[in-house]
Amino acid sequence: MGLSIKEVSKKFGIPSETLRYYERVGIIPPVNRTSGGIRDYSDEDIAWVENAKCMRAAGLPIEALIEYLKLFREGDSTFQARLDLLSEQREILLERQNQLNETISRLNYKISKYESAVKTGKLIWD
Amino acid sequence: MGLSIKEVSKKFGIPSETLRYYERVGIIPPVNRTSGGIRDYSDEDIAWVENAKCMRAAGLPIEALIEYLKLFREGDSTFQARLDLLSEQREILLERQNQLNETISRLNYKISKYESAVKTGKLIWD
DNA sequence: ATACAACTTTGAGTTAACTCAAAGTCAAGA
DNA sequence: TCTTGACTTTGAGTTAACTCAAAGTTGTAT
């Protein structure tokens, strides 16, 4: 007996609707069901959910996760394809990281200016 | 004589439609026009566009940028409000940065596993 | 002067990723 | 047993941020 959808929802802070959606579109594999057809998440199912949560939180597109699961379920012949997919997504995240750093620097600069401004009543630059 | 919308579009890689949209919703101020009503971007206009590009690239919501410009145009009495707005957005970006780092680490781990897997033909873990 | 590309506005359409609604099924407590 | 609340599916609705279309105007090259 694993976890109910409600429990998984609570555990990860993901709405049940979204968990069903993830399963429906295929970013997590079909979850085991009870005799009545109710979802009963195994540890493995839960690991997939956790992975999906992490990847989605970083902004990986649903499409990429669908493709990954598809390859995963095709078996050992897809190692290279999975490697390529993950590498490609990592590249995108690294670029995003650079952009984020740049923007944070810019915000830091502006914030320092405004910190002076609220003290002196005068905004220097910008 | 400043730059035309086409030139600004090219300079920043932002479609003209998007530049007009940015102006329409108010994340950049109204751009100067020629006698014929055609946009003629001044250096200051261009600085706003560059700022918008940077902020949007990092994922700041349009709403926040609209609010910032609104405060900016209200004058010196809004220094504190602008500081608060920027600080809040910085917080969000810092969290996003943490999430990104976590996901990149996870991808690095998986990628290293797949790099072995393509060599040995066997995937250890995951 | 005329053709033609680039510009204008208003308003509708698109995309990704959910999110909700409707209508029905199932399980546990009074 | 009956009700209540969680579950199911299918399919439609929502949101943010563009993106495109239609219909008309302007500026430049011949």
Image (spheres, coloured by chain):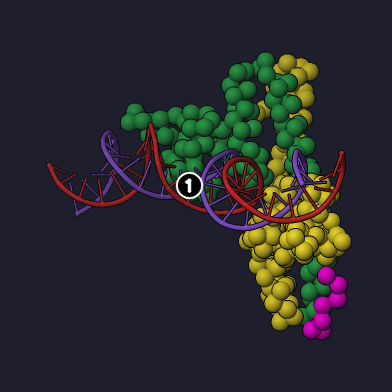
Chain colours: A green, B yellow, C purple, D red
| Up-down relation of residue B22 to residue B72 (above or below) | above
| Up-down relation of residue B89 to residue D22 (above or below) | below
**In terms of image quadrants, where is residue A124?**
bottom right
Residue D24: image location, x then y, percent: 62, 52
Residue sitting nearer the eye, A97 or B61: B61
Residue A105: image location, x then y, percent: 82, 59
Residue sitting nearer the eye, B95 or A118: A118
Residue D29: image location, x then y, percent: 87, 43
Image point 40% across, 30% down: which residue? A33
| Up-down relation of residue A80 to residue B76 (above or below) | above
Image point 76% across, 17% down: which residue? B120
* Left or right placement of residue B30 versus residue D21 in this view: right
Q: Is residue B32 magenta?
A: no
Disc 1: host chain = A
Residue sitting nearer the eye, B95 or A61: A61
How many numbered discs, if any?
A: 1
Q: Amino acid at mark 1?
A: Pro
**In terms of image quadrants, where is residue B86?**
bottom right
Residue C29: image location, x then y, percent: 25, 50
Q: Quadrant for the C terminus of chain B, please.
A: top right
The answer to whether any part of residue A90 appears in the image is yes
Image point 62% across, 42% down: which residue? A56
Magenta range: A119-126
Q: Quadrant for the N terminus of chain B, please.
A: bottom right
* Left or right placement of residue C11 versus residue B71 in this view: left
Residue wearing tag 1: A15
**In terms of image quadrants, where is residue B52?**
bottom right
* Left or right placement of residue B24 versus residue A5 in this view: right
* Left or right placement of residue C12 versus residue A74 in this view: left
Q: Main secondary structure of the magenta part?
A: loop
